[in-house]
Image: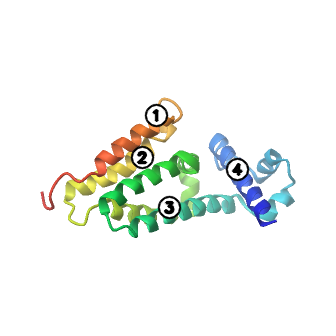
Amino acid sequence: MAGRRTDTRERIQQIALDLFVEQGYEKTSLREIAEALGVTKAALYYHFRTKEDIVHSLIEDIGTSLDEIIEWGQAQDDPERAREEVLRRLSDLIRGRFGPIMRFMQDNQPALKELHAGHILAKRMKDLFTILVPADAGPEDQLRARLALIALMAGNNPQFLDENPTAESAEVALRVALELASPRSPAGT
């Protein structure tokens, strides 16, 4: 029974996310989400009372996925291997469910600001950054690590491409991110 509830929850999240991306958060109602699901509002309320609850659940799910990547990266003894694998895992996450959520977040910034949803991911991005930056990194390598994260996100975001992201654009983004995250300079230069 728990598996069925999880499937229903994920289906609600996906339909709501599709509508939020297509119509905008403010223009999407719970009634429209219920209709798209083919359920009553009461059935939808069983899982989520508000649109805000749906958004928070989406961001929390991404946060959990990021936590797994961060925990794995922090547990590694080889910083170079950890850097590369963290970027690969993050790329897979972005190419999967995180991509549409990124687009939603980009398109609906005023609503997210009111929901205070962004802070949930901000700390995790800082934690990712600490894995990507070597302990003796100079300012150039610190910037390159930040740009590596941006490359992954921009290379998988339809707002920055002429088309929807493809496997090829995702691979290019990953190659650029890996190159950027490779330390170039000794500390202090």
Residue 98 screen position, x and y as percent: 55, 51
Mark 2 closeness class: few <14, some 14–19, many ≥20 residues within 10 Å: many
Determine crowd level at label 4: few under 14, some 14-19, many 20+ residues with C-alpha closer than 10 A. Answer: many
Amino acid type of the residue tagged 3 in the rendering: Leu
Q: Is residue 159 left or right of residue 183?
A: right
Mark closer to the chain start, 2 or 4:
4
Circle 3/circle 4 CB separation < 8 Å: no
Quadrant including the N terminus? bottom right
Q: Earlier in the sequence, mark 1 or mark 4?
A: 4
Question: Which is more N-terminal, label 4 or label 3?
Answer: 4
Please give left or right for residue 87 compared with residue 80 in the image.
right
Amino acid type shown at disc 2: Leu
What secondary structure is found at the residue carrying circle 3? helix
In this rendering, which labeled residue sits more in front, label 3 or label 1?
A: 1
Q: Which residue is mark 4?
A: 16
Write down the residue under mark 1: 168
Q: Is residue 152 above or below residue 123?
A: above
Q: Residue at x 59, y 50 (%)?
A: 97
| Displayed quadrant of residue 55 | bottom right
Q: CA distance from mark 3 to mark 4?
A: 22 Å
Q: Which numbered disc, 1 or 4, marks the residue closer to the eye?
A: 1
> What number is the disc on residue 66?
3
> Are dots 2 and 1 in contact, CB under 8 Å?
no
Q: Amino acid at mark 4?
A: Ala
Q: CA distance from mark 1 to mark 4?
A: 28 Å
Q: Is residue 107 visible?
A: no
Name the residue located 66 percent from the left edge and 41 percent from the top edge: 23
Q: Are marks 2 and 4 in contact (CB under 8 Å)?
A: no
- Name the kind of residue labelled 1 in the image: Glu
Q: Nearer the viewer, mark 2 or mark 1?
A: 1
Task: Give the number of the mark in front: 3 or 4.
Answer: 3
Residue 152 marker: 2
